[in-house]
Amino acid sequence: MKSDTPSFELRGVGQARAGRTVLEDVSAAIPRHVMTVLSGPSGGGKTSLLRLLNRLDDPVRGDILYDDRPIAEYTVTELRRRIALVFQTPVMFPGTVSDNLAVAAELAGVQDGQFDELAREVMLLAELDPSLLERPGGELSVGQKQRVNLARALMTSPEVLLLDEPTSALDPETAGALMKTIGSLSENGQLTIIVATHRVAETEQYAHHALVLRDGRLVENRDSQATTENERNR
């Protein structure tokens, strides 16, 4: 269920890269414990905004609050334990799927005795067979690698999951299955999910809030199709 207290609050946020403005005066509240879809044309500022939300970059103007606290007050380590970012292109570290999950487990301070159970749990959440844990990462399909990246992010038990174009490299059937998985993660009401995508049709049926960026400016801020349909069916 959506909380009245936002997860993030953006206040006049601006960002520049290589002398070019990529975000201009973006102000919005992003609700917690639901999925928000961040859409718009390529180059509109979606990825730039996601990078600000877990401090891969800092804004050149404006303020970002997370959990009612300026985001700059968090240490980067603390923030990235709470806010996980899954990149557009799946990144696999050397070794097995289990080795990949162990990288995140170490960051999160997971004890050795807890690893096996947690690894199995996140594999199932990402709709992967736990038998793949001992499979070399390089042998997986692109869709499986994207799910492993999702599972790896979940190893830190994040409060927020940021997804940058998670289906861009997938065929429509695989993309739809992945979005269904991601949508189910937000339905338990405990995880805030923000998905940046240009494939809106695959995403909005699971989202409760939508932000549209164009040329670095926020041009639309609304409840999404999923919210509208839920209210219609009450």
Image (cartoon, helix red, strand yellow):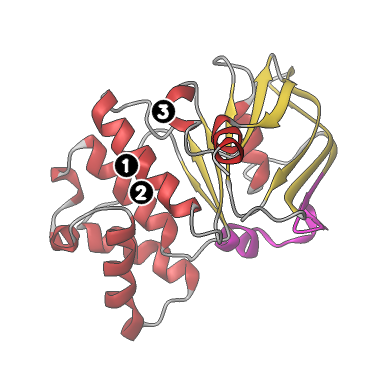
Q: Is label 1 in a helix, a strand or a loop?
A: helix
Q: Residue at x 72, y 28 (%)?
A: 221
Q: How far apart in space, not on screen, are marks 2 and 1 (Cα)?
A: 5 Å
**Residue 83, placed above or below residue 194:** below
Q: Please give the residue where the numbered disc 2 appears in the rendered image.
A: 149
Q: How far apart in space, not on screen, are marks 3 and 1 (Cα)?
A: 16 Å
> 77 and 26: which one is in front?
26
Residue 78 found in image quarter = bottom right
In the rendering, which numbered label is found on residue 202? 3
Q: Quadrant of the C terminus?
A: top right
**Residue 74, placed above or below residue 27:** below
Disc 2: CA contacts within 10 A as few (<14), some (14-19) or many (>=20): many
Q: Which residues are magenta?
A: 64-82
- Dot in front, 3 or 1: 3
Q: Residue 67 colored magenta? A: yes
In the rendering, which numbered label is found on residue 146? 1
**Residue 107, placed above or below residue 83:** below
> 122 and 32: which one is in front?
32
Question: From where the camera sits, is residue 92 visible?
Answer: no
Q: Residue at x 52, y 37 (%)?
A: 195
Q: Quadrant of the N terminus?
A: bottom right
Residue 179: x and y, percent? 38, 38
